[in-house]
Amino acid sequence: MIETVKGVGSLFSTNALSGVSTEGTNAVSAAAAQGAGGQMSFAQVLGDMATDMTDSLKLSETKSFEAIQGKATTREVVDAVMNAEQALQTAIAIRDKVVTAYLEVARMQI
């Protein structure tokens, strides 16, 4: 089974990745942002994205097991897997951009 992403939790004071739920993640984070003056830190945004990605991977895994048991249709499984693939590709693209930006900053002369 896919476990929660724990390494990102150390980037900010509130541990958003301590537990992963499969419902209302975006609504909760948007409500928290509005309650805190409408600003979220970069680490919170990345943490929310990691949580959403993990949720979609868990959902696709669950749908796959349900299909094996005969409880889910092929369409549901394909939709869940495609959403998980899209989330994973987005995470990989963001990771690549962050690494590229870090290397560019590291090459700057002081």
Image: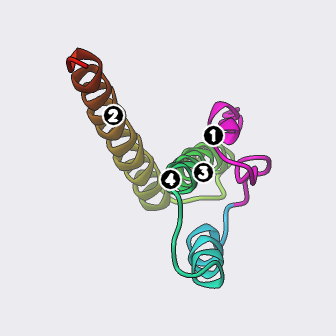
**In the figure, residue 97 lies in which quadrant?**
top left
The tag on residue 101 is none
Residue 68 in percent (x, y) is at 62, 42
Q: Is residue 76 left or right of residue 13?
A: left
**Residue at position x 60%, y 52% from top?**
55
Q: Which residue is mark 1?
A: 11
Q: Amino acid at mark 4?
A: Met
Q: Amino acid at mark 3?
A: Thr
Q: Nearer the viewer, mark 1 or mark 4?
A: 1
Alpha-carbon span between mark 3 and mark 2: 18 Å
**Labelled pair 4, 3 in contact (Cβ < 8 Å):** yes
Q: Nearer the viewer, mark 4 or mark 2?
A: 2
Q: Which residue is mark 3?
A: 51
**In the figure, residue 83 lies in which quadrant?**
bottom left
For the record, the magenta segment spans 1-21
The tag on residue 49 is 4
- Which type of secondary structure does the marked residue at label 2 adopt? helix
**Residue at position x 53%, y 66% from top?**
40
Residue 103 in percent (x, y) is at 27, 20
Residue 57 in percent (x, y) is at 55, 44
Categorize mark 1 by other alpha carbons within 10 Å: few (<14), some (14-19), many (20+): few
